[in-house]
Amino acid sequence: MINEQENLMYVVFGATGQTGSAVANALLERNFPVRVVLRSDKAASTWREKGADVAVAEVTDVEAMTAAMREADAVYVMNPPAYNVSDMFALAEQIGECYVEALTNADARKVVLLSSVGSQHASGTGNILTTHILERMLGNLAVPVTFLRAAAFMENWGSAAAIAAEQGVLPSFFAPLDRRLPMVSTEDIGRTAAEAMIEDWKGQRIIELHGPIDYSPNDVAAAFAAVLNRNVQAIAVPESDWQATISSFGFSPEAVNSYSEMMRGFNSGYIVFESSPEIETRTGQTAIEAAVDRLTGSKSK
């Protein structure tokens, strides 16, 4: 059931990121009252111009978080990326504790957590373990909670967009190159999360979010080729090169190891959707070609 009351507030954390901004924009497009929670006031004027209320709070500042979430009808929460820290899992535990305390103090009515494919596992998933931790901790809340387990982000291919444009190759940690796996656009994550926030439900629920179809690295390369109007070939990054390549992204040594474990989990087939009967499945509408079009700033020919 959709909640159409206009006097309620929908609170969105991470509004300067890919998914949080998509959630807030989707709610604003439907004229729902939105409060975005920013870590600084740098983007405050932009959000106010869009019609959003603005709060500033770090995700470890319980007092500020509580004030931002006070009596919210629904709150969208997520684990901010922390690839430069030595222990992202300890940080996730700390953030989870702060979310739980602030949500409880604020009397928020519902919570939607951005989670991930593979979050049902308690080990062997690398970075994805952070969302498993948050699911476990927010699962203790007395209010209704939705765990939105999203497929791999299509937009993550943006890190290879320049290489594809300049060299005609698309480096991939996913292998083999012809194996298809679920991917979803952050725009679809935003729309789905916004829809979940304005719905009413009881207890805990899990939503698994796929894209319209599954894609392989070869399919992604073909999408880049169509948008860039040049040949683009997917190439598998050898595991022997992972350490140096991931380190070049500015990751801490511990984050490099976690990222590598995650990619092994995808490539072995261990990181997949749970797909049990009690879990709801939703499908996004954005095709990989449209996502690549945005990543490159080009138009499909």
Image (tube, rainbow, N blue to C red):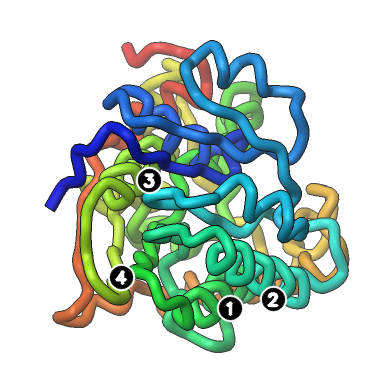
Say which amino acid is labelled 3. Ile
Category of crowding for the residue at label 3, using alpha-carbon neighbours closer than 10 angstroms: few (below 14), some (14–19), many (at least 20): many
* Contact (Cβ within 8 Å) of mark 2 with mark 3: no
**Element class at badge 2:** helix
**Position of 268 relative to 256 (above/below):** below
What residue does disc 3 label? 189
* Contact (Cβ within 8 Å) of mark 2 with mark 1: yes
**Element class at badge 3:** helix
**Which residue is more in the foreground, 210 or 245?**
210
Category of crowding for the residue at label 1, using alpha-carbon neighbours closer than 10 angstroms: few (below 14), some (14–19), many (at least 20): many
What's the distance in space between the residues labelled 4 and 2, CA to CA?
20 Å
* Residue located at (73% from left, 56% from top): 63
**Which residue is more in the foreground, 135 or 101?**
101
Where does residue 279 sit, x and y in percent of width and height? 22, 74
**Element class at badge 1:** helix
**Which residue is more in the foreground, 208 or 64?**
64
Say which amino acid is labelled 2. Glu
Q: Is residue 35 left or right of residue 149?
A: right
Where does residue 43 sit, x and y in percent of width and height? 68, 23
Say which amino acid is labelled 4. Ile
Category of crowding for the residue at label 2, using alpha-carbon neighbours closer than 10 angstroms: few (below 14), some (14–19), many (at least 20): some
What's the distance in space between the residues labelled 2 and 3, CA to CA?
24 Å
What's the distance in space between the residues labelled 4 and 1, CA to CA?
15 Å
- Badge number at residue 133: 1
Quadrant of the frame with the C terminus: top left
**Mark 1 or mark 4, which is nearer the start of the sequence?**
1
- Badge number at residue 206: 4
**Which residue is more in the foreground, 86 or 147?**
147
What residue does disc 2 label? 93
Q: Is residue 298 left or right of residue 197?
A: right
Where does residue 177 sit, x and y in percent of width and height? 44, 57
Residue occupying the far bottom of the picture: 122
